[in-house]
Image (spheres, grey):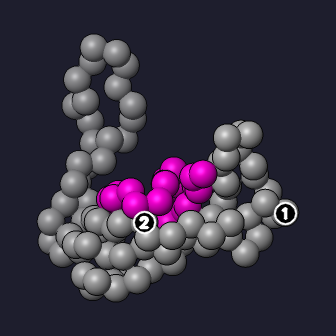
Amino acid sequence: MYAVIQTGGKQYKVTNDEVIFVEKLNAEAADTVTFDVVAVGTDDGIKVGTPFVEGAKVTAEVLKNGKGKKIRVATYKPKKGEKRTMGHRQPYTQVKITSIEA
């Protein structure tokens, strides 16, 4: 099972025990954070809408907060064989998904 979470206006597809980078959060290392679930995916397919995600939540542990550090975020998806030349850098927070409750 996986969940689609939303934070900072962006959506991320996550699974349990996965480590991801999200937009910078107001949190310190070892803090626990909770994300809103906008969709849930299972072996049967993606389930979207209130009946499927009502009460669903994803919790994660903050591993590192990128205070001042930045990661490259592409403003577009490059075509096959094309270099990613456009983009900008932004602060990030690294989190590890600890549980998905759906």
Q: Nearer the viewer, mark 1 or mark 2?
A: 2
Q: What residue sits right under mark 2 in the picture? A: 97
Q: Work out whether mark 1 precedes mark 2 in sequence or the reverse, and give the earlier one.
A: 1
Q: Kindly identify the residue that appears in the image at 75 percent across and 52 percent down.
A: 48
Tell me the SS state at disc 2: strand
Q: Position of residue 96 (x, y in %)?
A: 35, 66
Residue in the image at 57% along x and 52% along y: 2
Question: Does the rendering let one see residue 8?
Answer: no
Mark 1 residue element: helix
Q: Is residue 55 magenta?
A: no
Q: Is residue 72 above or below residue 31?
A: above
Quadrant occupied by the C terminus: bottom right
Residue 3, given in percent of the width and then of the height, sits at 59, 56
| Image quarter of residue 60 | bottom left
**The residue positioned farthest toward the top in the image shown:** 81
- Disc 2 packing (10 Å; few <14; some 14–19; many ≥20): many
- Amino acid type at circle 2 is Ile
- Nearest the viewer among 87 and 27 is 27
User: Are the residues tagged 1 and 2 within 8 Å (C-beta)?
Assistant: no
Horizontal arrangement in the rendering, residue 87 relative to residue 45 (left or right): left
Up-down relation of residue 79 to residue 67 (above or below): above
Numbered circles on residues, count:
2
Looking at the rendering, the stretch of residues picked out in magenta corresponds to 1-22
- Amino acid type, mark 1: Pro
Q: Residue 45 appears in which quarter of the rendering?
A: top right
Q: Is residue 14 magenta?
A: yes
The residue shown at (33%, 59%) is 19
Residue 3 relative to residue 21: left or right: right
Q: Is the residue 36 above or below the residue 70 in the image? A: below
Residue assigned mark 1: 51
